[in-house]
Amino acid sequence: MSRRLFALVTALYPRAWRERYAEELSDLCEEFVDAGETTRLHLALTILFAAAVERFRSLRSSRHRVLLASSTVLIVVLAAVTFATNGFGLLVSALPTKGPVPNDAIVNGQTDISKVPDFVAAVGKDGKIVGYVPKADLFPAPTRGAHLGPQTPFEVQPVYAGDLRTLVGHFYPGIGFVPLGVSPSTQSCVPESTVANGQSQAIPCPGVAQTIPNVVGMYTPTGVAKLSGMGLSVQIVAVLSSSVTPGHIVSILPIAGTTVAARSVVTVDISVNVS
Amino acid sequence: MEGTRETRLMAANEVRGSSDRSVLVLTSLAGGPKHGYALIQDVREFAGVRLGPGTLYGCLSKLEAAGLVEALPAEARRHPYRITTSGLEVLRRQLSESARIAEIGLDRIAGAMT
């Protein structure tokens, strides 16, 4: 607990009590917090109530005890509410969280988005944190229909400084972090590898053009594997169809035969059951 | 916190009539002098009761005012306390009384179950 907060909390103790025990209590609180026994907020609340009890004891002989007791109750209630609500929501704003994706957020290859911080630490080629990417850019919400598959993070993502407001550069697929003012075309692109049909193959850099294959009518896992195997990002949208068997691909966008840059996003509409 | 004989008597009566926390603190100190954190750990171990710093110092201030415990010189940032002779006597009486009541209660429970 900071000295300032401690002084505020212990102000309720009678002066004689404070002069005798406040320093000792402060040292014990520090030891308590250092040992991870409790949180500072919980500690502040418990001391506040203990101070109120001590204040009541000292008021027993006072002629104005009713008035003093009432004011003490009022102060305690106000202070408790202030602490519990972070000053009615005014003292602490809801600051976004930032940091790496915690290990427990990834289970069986699936990411539990609720455990991912608001801004995810982005690591440069030298292994150091270069900034933070908004979670919304890593895991965008579905634009239409139900988003059934994980978003493949192969799109350009903004990278912000530690203040989470200053744009410092972008992450380019196959290139990595490129600071502002530097053209990504001047950077070397490293083709990434993927596994398709049990064989490892390289995903070309965005400068390479690819032709989208026709996967319409295919069973979804087969069609998606074909697209993913080429390094294309797949975004799945569930649609109702009376003509296509559930679980099969209804349509894709861009349509088959279109030439796109490698690692582009292909939206795949799949047929679902009408329940 | 020195006081007159009357205030010390009053404080001692208050301690006797107060919650079990004072008994727990005195019991812990009966095993030897301890600073606040060690005292809290000890009480948690032998009684399963978790005292907070505020509660502990509430007890210690009452016990010290009643002359049942006394502060020892500080060791760095730790402030040890020890039980006084009066404290040992009050604790002995309190525990004997509790043991007597417990014995009566257990006898009655045994009678009710037969």
Image (tube, coloured by chain):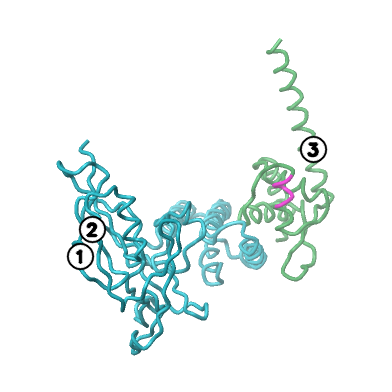
Chain colours: A cyan, B green
Residue beneath disc 2? A214
Badge 3 sits on which subunit? B
Q: CA distance from mark 1 to mark 2?
A: 7 Å
Q: Is residue A114 left or right of residue A37?
A: left
* Residue type marked 1: Gly
Q: CA distance from mark 2 to mark 3?
A: 92 Å
Are the residues under marks 3 and 1 on the same chain?
no
The subunit carrying tag 1 is A
Q: Position of residue A260 (x, y in %)?
A: 24, 71
Quadrant (top left/top right/bottom left/bottom right) for the C terminus of chain A: top left
- Residue A58 appears in which quarter of the rendering? bottom right
Name the residue at 68% across, 42% down: B48
Q: Nearer the viewer, mark 2 or mark 3?
A: 2
The single residue placed furthest to the top in the displayed view is B114
Q: In the displayed orientation, state which residue is furthest to the left.
A: A242
Is B71 situated above or below B20?
below
What span is colored magenta in the figure? Answer: B41-45
Residue bearing mark 3: B93
Residue B43 is covered by the magenta coloring: yes
Eye-nearest disc, 3 or 1: 1
**Amino acid type, callout 3:** Arg
Mark 1 and mark 2 residues within 8 Å of each other at the beta carbon = yes
Magenta portion: prevailing SS class: helix
**Residue A257 tag number:** 1
Query: In this view of the protein, which residue sits in the foreground, A141 or A266?
Result: A266
Which residue is at a point 33% across and 54% down the rendered structure image? A149
